[in-house]
Image (cartoon, rainbow, N blue to C red):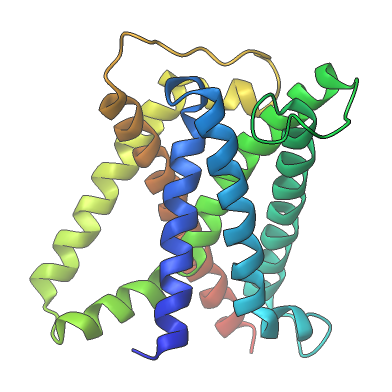
Amino acid sequence: MKPKMMLKLAVDIGMTAALLLLMAYELIGQAAHEWIGIGMFFLFILHHILNGRWSRNLLKGRYNPVRVVQTMTVLLLLCAMTGSMISGVILSRHALSFLPVKGGRSFARNLHMLSAYWGFVLMSVHLGFHWSMMTKMAGKLFHKSSAVRTWAGRLLAMVIAGYGIYAFGKREIGSYMLLINQFVFFDFEEPLICFYVDYIAVMGLFIFIGNYVCAGLRLIGGRGK
């Protein structure tokens, strides 16, 4: 694997890990949440620098169904990340408390919740769009694949996605995305691992959805030729 590709993969893994840590918010502490958020910001910038070719080609070439949906998802994700960063600066009580920012905390809190949960879902879907590419890369690292391994992976993905549906409802993520609940509930007596198992499953659910939506769009695009 080329060094640049390895760096891209490392940045993407770092962003995914940071995103999961950020979703725990009160469970990891406000100060840690803010510093991880700053780290996420720099990883986000580095990600776009490493993928600058995509931005430069945004207005070039033909837009098929896959490219349209992928581009819309990236632009919405960019809006969510921007909303998280701006609201995070306003709400900061630790890492950026030295900044002369006053007022707007109520609006910023709602914006931060919307941006965080929509960003979580959109980033998971975005990962799903590129999942087949990542599995191919993993296959090259292991140098071989088999039908048994392929079907075992698909079965595991279905199990994770199935549990993800349950976890999505259990954690009331939909209500946070729609601001039906404006305060996130955290059970401080719950083991942290249980929280992350649920959120990893929800992430797996939207990766699963993104992967198969992308496959379906490619099929539709192929038939349209």
Task: Tell me which corner region of the image, top left, top right, bottom left or bottom right, holds residue 65.
Answer: bottom right
Q: Residue at x 47, y 70 (%)?
A: 130
Query: Which quadrant holds the C terminus?
Result: bottom right
Q: Residue at x 82, y 20 (%)?
A: 105
Q: Please say if 199 is above or below 11.
A: above
Q: Please say if 209 is above or below 136.
A: above
Q: Please say if 56 is above or below 132.
A: below
Task: Give 224 or 147, whichever is nearer the viewer.
Answer: 147
Query: Which quadrant holds the N terminus?
Result: bottom left
Q: Position of residue 102 (x, y in %)?
A: 90, 23
Task: Tell me which corner region of the image, top left, top right, bottom left or bottom right, holds residue 113.
Answer: top right
- Residue 133 placement, left or right of 33: left
Q: Position of residue 212 (x, y in %)?
A: 45, 61
Q: How many marks?
A: 0
Q: Please say if 62 is above or below 131.
A: below
Q: Position of residue 155 (x, y in %)?
A: 20, 54
Q: Position of residue 220 (x, y in %)?
A: 58, 74
Q: Residue at x 44, y 57 (%)?
A: 14
